[in-house]
Amino acid sequence: MLSYYMREAREGLLRNAGAGLAAAALVAVAMTLLGAMLLFRSGLSDLRGFLESQVSMKVYVSPGVDPREAARILEARSFVKSVQVETKEEMLQKLAAFFEGKEQLLDSFKQSGLPDAIRLELRDPAQAEAVAGQLRGMSGIMEVIYPQRYAETVLQLTRQLNRYGTAAFVFFAAVSFLTVFLAMHLSLYQRQKEIRVKLLLGSNPAHVRGQFLFEGGIIGLLGSLAAAAALDMLYRSMLFPLERQFRAVFHLTGTGLYGVELAVAAAGTVIGVAASFASTRKLMKDG
Amino acid sequence: MLRIQDLTKRYGEHTVLDRLNLHLEQGETAFLQGRSGSGKSTLLKLLYRELADYTGEIRLGGQSIRELPKHETRRRVGVIFQSFELLERKTILENVMLAGEIAGRSRRELEPEACRLLERTGLRGREQAYPGELSGGEQQRTAIARALLNRPGLLLADEPTGNLDTETALEMLQLLTSLQQEEGMTMLIVTHSERLTEACPARMLRMEQGRILES
């Protein structure tokens, strides 16, 4: 029966190639959006996790305050595990290596009122925000920089990606559903005689419908396989180099990518089958 | 094989079949004649269940067709149409095998049987031809082979020679009756042609005012 379905689906797709291709292309767009959203969400989630797990914090002291004295005071606090003073000179030394060949940029740093700093290692990264608030209230402290504050920005970004990404996905999924629906409707129209003859010869209406569901599923699968290929390219050209460079931050493995591709393939096929299911409802009523 | 009791079919106020009774034995052949609009096609459509909503009883092989799923009835009843109803995009062999494929049988299993029927209907060597490449007579032979593939207990032919010239029509009728004898099925042929019924000795039925009269 499967070979019969496959033969009939192939014949149907070739007969209606233009509409089938258009429908598959739209499924591909919707599924690429879905897959890209999942990949970027995974990347942002890794980044947020990394930021939140950081225990370091940088405290800039006001001009005129002795950084070593301030460090001694901070070291006595219960939430501090260790301190390390970083004077303006030490910081400029580090920057000199960074700005090698662009000394004019380093000069602008030298002329600026770069303050001395203290690097704190906290006992509990979860307390970072509360500690930063407490430190900002202390006299002699100019600014407190800690990675967790960027985690909130990343979270906002993730929320926006979820909101707009989901809206775009839903839109394209609906359009691709409609296109598959129309392609299958056209196919049903073109094959009215074939359907009638099959039913007259004793075909079970559910089997005739099954043939069209199979065809819709193939359209969805073809579109989503194209999307999976696009996602693979996106991963290899953009995300994989980023991961290789920041191993400590990003953890999307090949298995994770295959998981996303599999989800995309399944979702595309479901769209194809569901659209075909909707377009063949009348066939079941008349069968 | 076929027993119809008090079959009534109405379209609104118009009664097409009026308490019609008919009994056909296993292996029996009958011609059904009648004027246009006398209800011949309606009777056939009820038998292969293209129409529903009737009163009375139609029993096939002792079983009421109401108890059978529609597709199951159609597998037990072979139908030959005046317009052949072949699929243009399929070859002759594929058209014949289609009747078995939709019943879940594989092509490998069906091909020898389909080829045997095509040989029996004089179409050997034309298996890969498409319906558009065949004459009307050859197309009807293909339709006959297709109708016989599932070995139906009852074969219905609705004006099977209506689109053929007299000589080809006679040939076709001879083929049908000899196949009917070989396969042992019951056959009901609707026709307008007096020449055909004269050429073939069989039970004659006439439809008048929604009832069947023996001629």
Image (tube, rainbow, N blue to C red):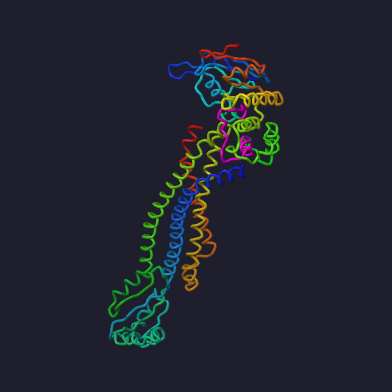
The picture places residue A203, in percent across and down from the top left corner, at 58, 34
The picture places residue B22, in percent across and down from the top left corner, at 60, 15
> Would you say A217 lies left or right of A74 here?
right
Q: Is residue A224 magenta?
A: no
Q: Measuring 54% from the left and 64% from the top, which residue is drawn there?
A: A254
Between A283 and B28, the one nearer to me in the picture: B28
The picture places residue B25, in percent across and down from the top left corner, at 66, 18
Q: Is residue B76 magenta?
A: yes
Q: Measuring 61% from the left and 18% from the top, which residue is drawn there?
A: B195
As drawn, B45 above or below B118: above
As drawn, B204 above or below B83: above
Between A116 and A172, the one nearer to me in the picture: A172
Outermost residue toward the right?
B182
Residue extent of the magenta highlight: B75-99
Q: Quadrant of the N terminus of chain A?
A: top right
The picture places residue A223, in percent across and down from the top left corner, at 49, 53
Between B132 and A275, the one nearer to me in the picture: B132
